[in-house]
Amino acid sequence: MLKNHYGPWKANGNPEIFLPSESWLNHPFLFESAGIKPSFLPYFSSKTKAFDFVSFSEAIKSLPAQSVVLLQSGAQNPTGCDPSPDQWRELASIFSQRGHLAFFDAAYPGFASGDIDTDLEGVRLFAEQEIPLVFVSTYGKSFGLYSERVGILSILAPSEEVGKRIERHMKLLARAESGAPPDFGSMIIESVLSDDTLERQWRQEVRHMADQLKSRRIALREGLEKLQTPGDWRHITDQSGMFSYVGLSVEQVTLLRNKHHVYLQDSGRISIAGLNKFNIDYTARSISAVVKATTPQ
Ligand SMILES: Cc1ncc(COP(=O)(O)O)c(C=O)c1O
């Protein structure tokens, strides 16, 4: 719908979305398959192993006015690095000045802080400032409904009239895609979110899961530090959510895979959810051995 109806794209004939260089691996493919060109913005500093706010915000400032930029609302996949509340405020002000549209992907609300509302503060801030935005969220993760394909799409409309027009377009698009989409997943979500007790229980379960992720991060960092692994490992606990960019090179990742059978992406992204009390020590020992073997004395 964006491709066919977003005014600036229609005017310049150039549907292009700007993504963080480090983002969900599938984002570029998704947009490409919809005929939208993905371009990339610096996001993560491999030096500090943290969000590079200065480079990201400068890049956003220098984009053509009314660009479309994808942001993840929190617990960023793959880096585990999100803007701070102050940085969200600054980003909102840049979007507002430049007239950019924010395409928010909220795949992991609650996974960073444990609190769903806290993790959506950035989105709320943008919405309050009436920055044009598209918000997509999957319930695959936060409800564990992976294969039910259930999620939300919200578009902030400048008026009720425009909102109604957008809704009509969305219905036509949905109709073109499938006649009767499955509704089992959405019925589960509806049952939980329309019942105070169930909703409270769900929020507690999300918090419990975020706490679990935090404790696994602590265990991995402590394991690496106890083994006197060369380097600084604080970023593992500074980052949050399900993924961590641990800062390993492709050579180190390959060694981990081939010699120790610890599997992670070439980017050095670890799935923290894949760690547990049975494999965390082994993982720390393996990473430590590989880092020691590849670090010059
Ligand atoms: C950042 C991000 N967005 C979207 C998705 C898609 O989620 P789903 O397959 O539940 O729609 C994922 C899945 O890994 C993700 O990490």
Image (cartoon, rainbow, N blue to C red):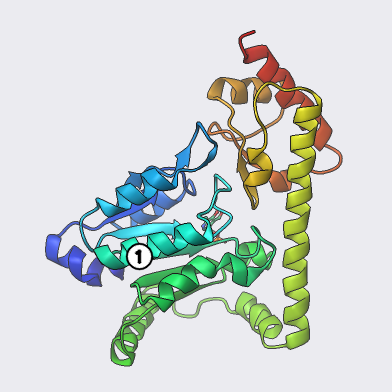
The residue shown at (24%, 69%) is: 4
Specify the quarter for ligand 1.
Answer: bottom right
Considering the image in quadrants, where does the C terminus appear?
top right
Q: Nearer the viewer, residue 206 or 185?
A: 206
Q: Point out the residue furthest to the bottom here.
A: 161
Q: Amino acid at mark 1?
A: Ser
Residue of label 1? 93
Considering the image in quadrants, where does the N terminus appear?
bottom left
Within-10-Å neighbours for mark 1: few <14, some 14–19, many 20+: some
Apparent side of residue 118 relative to residue 159 in the rendered image (left or right):
right
Q: Nearer the viewer, residue 160 or 87?
A: 87
Apparent side of residue 252 relative to residue 31 in the rendered image (left or right):
right
Q: Point out the residue furthest to the right here.
A: 278
Label 1 lies in ligand 1 vicinity (Cβ under 8 Å): no
Figure quadrant of residue 274: top right
As displayed, is residue 6 above or below residue 250?
below
Residue 157 coordinates in the image, percent (x, y) = 34, 82
Q: Is residue 135 visible?
A: yes
As displayed, is residue 24 above or below residue 209?
above
As displayed, is residue 101 above or below residue 214?
below
The residue shown at (64%, 83%) is: 190
The residue shown at (60%, 65%) is: 109
Figure quadrant of residue 179: bottom left
Apparent side of residue 206 relative to residue 135 in the rendered image (left or right):
right
Q: Nearer the viewer, residue 289 or 136?
A: 289
Residue 231 coordinates in the image, percent (x, y) = 65, 25
